[in-house]
Image (cartoon, rainbow, N blue to C red):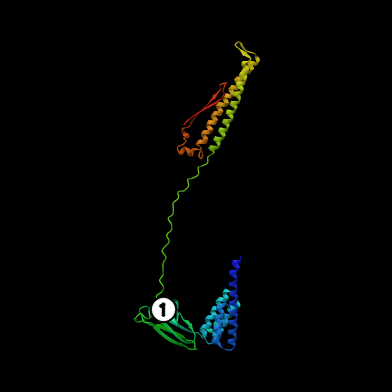
């Protein structure tokens, strides 16, 4: 923040100094106009406007030129004031400048310069004219003027003329320039240096990312089916254990001749529990195996590994069989790839 203030303060001080000097020059110009010393007053207004451009300063400068009889300079300052007033949105100043320009315009002398052959450079009073100015009437102040024309390898052409206080239309035709010795050749324009085109680094072609694996409801279904299979195996295990317990109870109540009533009931319960256990193991095992297969072959699952050659679900064979051995009830699952 301190650095920013240190940079901004000199700029503001310089602007204030320019404004103060512009105001001083303006007041000096007004005093010289009152004394009818127009030759000294007009440069004061011009310097003031250069330091601090203002519509009022342009109007006073145009008035100074008009009083000095320099109608072309006065008209140009009034026209400039019109443009500045429009930019600053000062309609009253714009009307004043436009009225002054209209009063001076009938007093203008204009010179139209044309050339018989193409020339490289045309000057009026030492100032190079734009090519578009040729053939266009140019306002000029009363006094002595000089037109110069030069072309490479040609002899320079000079045409002096005098403008009086009376408005008139002057035409200056630049004739065909004769051959010269090169001393009058205008300077060559600076060469245009073309920068070599910038080479863009080669673009690397990146392979597009593989499309995402499609999601399939088959994986969810497989998980649900496998879960049901786990429940079925659990049911089969529960009733298998119950069958073992009932079978053990019946042995203590039975012999070679038969079973008493308690042993008969225990044996009957053991057979029923064994049947339910077998059904639970078979159904649960089938569901479990089916769920695993559906999960593996579903898109987005381990099918990616299958395509890589690490798994082949299509060749997967799963077998499930119940085991009702009283000593080790359960389910036997076998598989082959």
Tell me what residue is drawn at x 55 percent, y 87 percent.
38
Which of the 4 image quadrants contains residue 83? bottom right
Name above or below for residue 274 compared with residue 180.
Answer: above
Tell me what residue is drawn at x 54 percent, y 25 percent.
322
Left or right, 19 with reference to 163: right
Is 110 in front, or is 159? 159
Q: Position of residue 97 (x, y in %)?
A: 57, 80
Kindly state the secondary structure of the residue where label 1 is placed.
Answer: strand
Question: Residue extending furthest right?
Answer: 262
Tell me what residue is drawn at x 61 percent, y 20 percent.
270
Question: Residue extending furthest top?
Answer: 257
Q: Is residue 89 visible?
A: no
Q: Position of residue 42 (x, y in %)?
A: 55, 84
Left or right, 125 with reference to 234: left
Mark 1 surroundings within 10 Å by alpha-carbon count, few (fewer than 14), some (14 through 19), many (20 or more): some
Q: How many marks?
A: 1
Is 142 in front, or is 14? 14
Q: Position of residue 60 (x, y in %)?
A: 57, 82
Q: Position of residue 271 (x, y in %)?
A: 60, 20
Left or right, 158 with reference to 74: left
Is 105 in front, or is 46? 46
Q: Which residue is mark 1?
A: 121
Tell me what residue is drawn at x 60 percent, y 75 percent.
16
Name above or below for residue 326 compared with residue 77.
Answer: above
Q: Is residue 241 visible?
A: yes
Q: Quadrant of the N terminus?
A: bottom right
């Amino acid at each position: 923040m301190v650095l920013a203030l240190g940079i901004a303060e000199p700029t503001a001080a310089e602007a204030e100094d320019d404004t103060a000097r512009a105001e001083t020059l303006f007041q000096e110009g007004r005093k010289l106009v009152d004394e009818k010393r127009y030759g000294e007053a007009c440069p004061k207004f011009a310097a003031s406007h250069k330091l601090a451009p203002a519509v009022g300063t342009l109007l006073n400068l145009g008035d100074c030129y008009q009083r000095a009889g320099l109608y072309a300079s006065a008209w140009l300052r009034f026209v400039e004031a019109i443009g500045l007033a429009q930019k600053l949105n000062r309609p009253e100043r714009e009307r004043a400048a436009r009225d002054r320009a209209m009063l001076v315009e009938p007093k203008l002398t204009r010179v139209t310069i044309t050339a018989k052959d193409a020339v490289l450079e045309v000057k009026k009073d030492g100032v190079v004219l734009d090519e578009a100015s040729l053939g266009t009437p140019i306002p000029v102040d009363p006094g002595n003027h000089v037109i110069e024309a030069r072309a490479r390898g040609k002899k320079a052409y000079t045409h002096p003329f005098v403008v009086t206080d009376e408005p008139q239309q002057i035409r200056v035709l630049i004739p065909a320039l004769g051959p010269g010795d090169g001393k009058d050749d205008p300077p060559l324009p600076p060469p245009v240096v073309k920068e070599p085109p910038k080479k863009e680094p080669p673009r690397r072609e990146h392979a597009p990312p593989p499309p995402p694996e499609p999601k399939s409801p088959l994986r969810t279904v497989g998980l649900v089916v496998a879960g049901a299979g786990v429940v079925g195996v659990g049911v089969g295990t529960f009733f298998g254990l119950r069958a073992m317990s009932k079978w053990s109870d019946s042995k203590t109540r039975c012999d070679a001749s038969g079973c008493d009533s308690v042993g008969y009931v225990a044996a009957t319960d053991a057979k029923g529990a064994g049947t339910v256990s077998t059904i639970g193991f078979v159904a649960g095992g089938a569901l479990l195996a089916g769920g695993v297969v559906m999960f593996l072959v579903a898109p987005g699952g381990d099918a990616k590994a299958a395509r890589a050659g690490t798994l082949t679900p299509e060749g997967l064979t799963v077998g499930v069989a119940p085991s009702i051995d009283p000593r080790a009830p359960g389910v036997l699952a076998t598989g082959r790839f």
